[in-house]
Amino acid sequence: MKPVIALTKGRLEKQFLEFFRSLGYNDQALIDKGRKLRVDTDDFQFVFAKGPDVATYVEHGIADLGIVGEDILLEFQPDVFDLLPLPFGKCRVALATEEGTQWPARKRRIASKYPNITKEYFRKKGESVDIFKLEGSVELAPILGLADAIVDIVETGTTLEENGLVIKEEIHQISARCIANRSSLKIKRALLNPVIQSFQKGETVS
Ligand code: PRP
């Protein structure tokens, strides 16, 4: 039996592959996967999904382990075991506005893919705001006048810069995390422990 790992597609997937290879695992099947969403390597079965769905598959025991951004854990609070931080996917969740923006006197409007993180951030500040949930390209919202500010992931800062936005405040420093299904950790301990140990030993990758 192989452990099943749910892997977040996109940027994290690329960084995970580099990390996985650095640990000495054979990743050829992953490189050759094309559009396949389920791929077996010598040691694992991988399933590829969007971040929130990775958490869902792990929560329900379809996958034993998941590789997911900490933003997903903060936003959705899935019932999974947050095993360990991984040395990639390092970024910030930040509040950003157009350069030179003055806060309006009225209730502020904030656009985000992360309504729960946003709500919690402003709740702690004791401020009530209107939140607009967007699915992507959140930087457009202040430019087009939908919102006064955004709460979003900043990795290199290029997207903010190229769209004339600046960080007002950092809310969280985050990284990729390895999560586990709670039952798998107990029932499949012998199978999963060596994997977890090897992930713990992994070096920082770009
Ligand atoms: C994320 C995030 C920012 C961008 C930040 O979006 O929402 O838009 O990356 O990265 P940077 O600081 O390196 O420029 P993503 O690329 O995942 O696409 P999306 O906007 O469609 O969600």
Image (cartoon, rainbow, N blue to C red):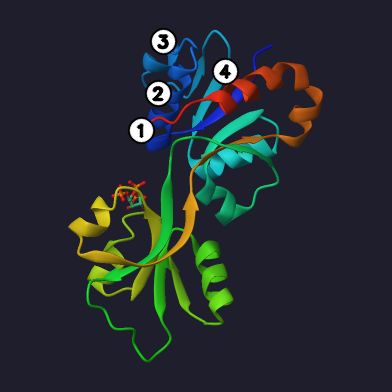
Mark 2 or mark 1, which is nearer to you?
Answer: 1
Measured Cα–Cα span from mark 4 to mark 2: 17 Å
Mark 3 or mark 1, which is nearer to you?
Answer: 1
Q: Residue at x 20, y 64 (%)?
A: 164
Instruction: Count how many numbered circles sit on residues in the image.
Output: 4
In which quarter of the view is residue 162 placed? bottom left
Q: Are marks 3 and 2 in contact (CB under 8 Å)?
A: no
Q: Is residue 71 left or right of residue 139?
A: right
Measured Cα–Cα span from mark 3 to mark 1: 20 Å
Sequence-wise, which precedes: disc 4 or disc 3? 3
Looking at the picture, which amino acid does disc 2 mark?
Answer: Glu
Looking at the picture, which amino acid does disc 3 mark?
Answer: Gln
- Residue under label 2, please give it: 18
- Mark 1, Cα crowd under 10 Å, few <14 / some 14-19 / many 20+, is few
Which of 155 and 132 lies nearest the eye of the viewer? 155
Sequence-wise, which precedes: disc 4 or disc 1? 4
The dot on residue 28 is 3
- Mark 2, Cα crowd under 10 Å, few <14 / some 14-19 / many 20+, is some
Q: Considering the numbered disc 4 on the image, is that residue within a helix, a strand or a loop? A: strand
Mark 3 or mark 2, which is nearer to you?
Answer: 2
* Residue 110 vertical placement versus 53 (above, below): below
Q: Position of residue 109 (x, y in %)?
A: 40, 77
- Residue under label 4, please give it: 45
Q: Residue at x 59, y 28 (%)?
A: 200
Q: Is residue 173 visible?
A: yes
Sequence-wise, which precedes: disc 3 or disc 2? 2
Mark 4 or mark 2, which is nearer to you?
Answer: 2
Q: Are marks 2 and 1 in contact (CB under 8 Å)?
A: yes
- Residue under label 1, please give it: 206
